[in-house]
Image: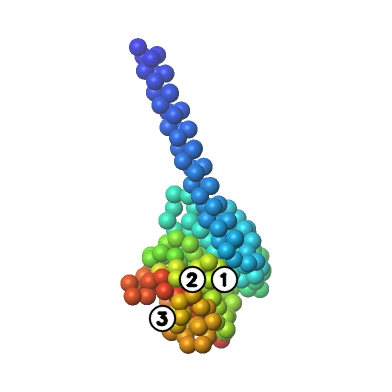
Amino acid sequence: MNLRRSLAFAGVAILTAATGSQAHAVEVSELQHQIDEVLEKTTGGVQISPNEISWEGGEVIMSFPLPGEEIAPPSSRAATKLQAKAAGISEKSIKEAVASGKALAASDNCPTEIIGNDWYCFYQYKDFGGRRLQWNQARHEVRYFSLYDFANKTSSWSNKGGKYIYVQGRSQTGMDRSCNDDPIILWQEHPHTKKSFVGASLDNKADCFWTSY
């Protein structure tokens, strides 16, 4: 009787493990599908890790939540190296900063000044959830979210640097250039501020942005 019970429990454990493994495989496959979809819809993107896409040599990076998670994790090692290079920061200085106890990412996982000043991030969902799209460089010209398959997808944001960020909506649906022709300022991000939810009236309406010098 004990042997039968042991075999039964063993069978359940194996089945549970197999089911869990299959579920994880499905989640990983779904994550890759989302990444592939963004790469197909955009130009110049390169997948640099299981959950990240880079554009323009690391000046722009999109991070996806890992399977089973709701918030995209801090930048991977591959992303950090690209970001440091784009910001003109040496890997040695980053290692020294980390060794002294400084964090590479803030509580919302947007990069800190250790990887260069003026990082700013946009998030797919409120409370800094979903995909994270981040920059370090100043963008004085209007920058379109559609270039990264992120138009009308911003619900929260974090501005870690000293620049002002001006987020706009299109004056005409489906026309990016209307951000230039007749911009509608949705919100302004002051230096070193963040917002966990843009509000119901502004949710998923951001189409483009530009920054101060």
Residue 150, visible in the rendered structure: yes
User: Badge 3: how crowded within 10 Å, few (<14), some, or many (20+)?
Assistant: some
User: Badge 1: how crowded within 10 Å, few (<14), some, or many (20+)?
Assistant: some
Q: Amino acid at mark 2?
A: Ala
N-terminal of the two: label 3 or label 1?
Answer: 1
Residue 118, visible in the rendered structure: no
Q: How is the image coloured?
A: rainbow
Task: Calculate the distance from the C-alpha at mark 3 to the C-alpha at mark 1.
Answer: 19 Å
Residue 87 placed where, x, y %? 63, 73
Image vertical order of residue 94 relative to residue 26, above or below? below
Q: Nearer the viewer, residue 204 or 91?
A: 204
Q: Which residue is mark 2?
A: 151
Q: Nearer the viewer, residue 169 or 139?
A: 169
| Label at residue 92 | none
Q: Residue at x 53, y 47 (%)?
A: 29
Q: Which residue is mark 1?
A: 147
Q: Quadrant of the N terminus?
A: top left
